[in-house]
Image (cartoon, rainbow, N blue to C red):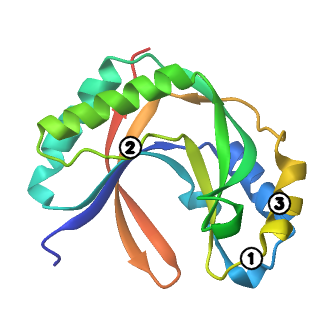
Amino acid sequence: MPKTLRAFVAVPIPDAVALFLMQIQAQLQLPKRNIRWVAAKNIHLTLKFLGDIDPSRVPAVAAQMDAAANATAAFSLTAKGVGVFPDLGHARVLWVGLVGDLDRLKTIQAALESGMASAGFKRETRGFGAHLTIGRIRRRIDAQLISESVEPLKAVASDGFRVDRLMLLKSILTPNGPEYTLLHTSHLAA
């Protein structure tokens, strides 16, 4: 049995939004062999990546999640637009952005970041950018081709969805992609 587990805190994505994201994946006119698409069941909004942690730390993580969730009312987001990280010339990640109550999303993410730091986890040095990863580019794709594929999808949007809980997930990396196991759920205030 492993001595550590790979864990992160995320917001789940409803099935209807996952279907919308699969449709986006299908519409992108990019060489499929160069991209590892994220399976719809694995798409989520990561709020805090914890890395490899000792299982004994799960209760402390759950307590910080509960505190952040209890201090935040449920809110709505919409998946909208397609982009790449870090830029078109060096694209490594394909993502769909989020719009809606981003202030509340940033508030809960900041509360999680602060709470996890007080529990002994390292603070993230990069700023939080709300996005849903839909694919990882394995081999370089011409920037012009990416631009031509992404540009028509800049304004496409899903139906809105309600963010009402946080999940602590364990991730096991496999050759067929990650497998996630739910460890804890924290419900946002009503």
32 above or below 119? Answer: below
188 above or below 90? Answer: above
Q: What percent of the width, then of the height, locates residue 1?
A: 16, 78
User: Which quadrant is the C terminus positioned in?
Assistant: top left
Mark 2 or mark 1: name the one nearer the start of the chain: 1
Mark 1 — residue? 141
94 above or below 130? Answer: below
Three-letter amino acid code of the residue under disc 1: Ile
Mark 2 or mark 3: name the one nearer the start of the chain: 3
User: For the residues marked 2 and 3, what is the alpha-carbon distance in whole angstroms?
Assistant: 34 Å
Q: What percent of the width, then of the height, locates residue 55?
A: 14, 59
Left or right: 155 with respect to 115?
A: right
Using the image, tell me which numbered label, if any, was put on residue 167: 2
The residue located at (12%, 72%) in the rendering is 3
Using the image, tell me which numbered label, if any, was put on residue 147: 3
Q: What percent of the width, then of the height, locates residue 165?
A: 43, 32
* Secondary element at tag 3: helix
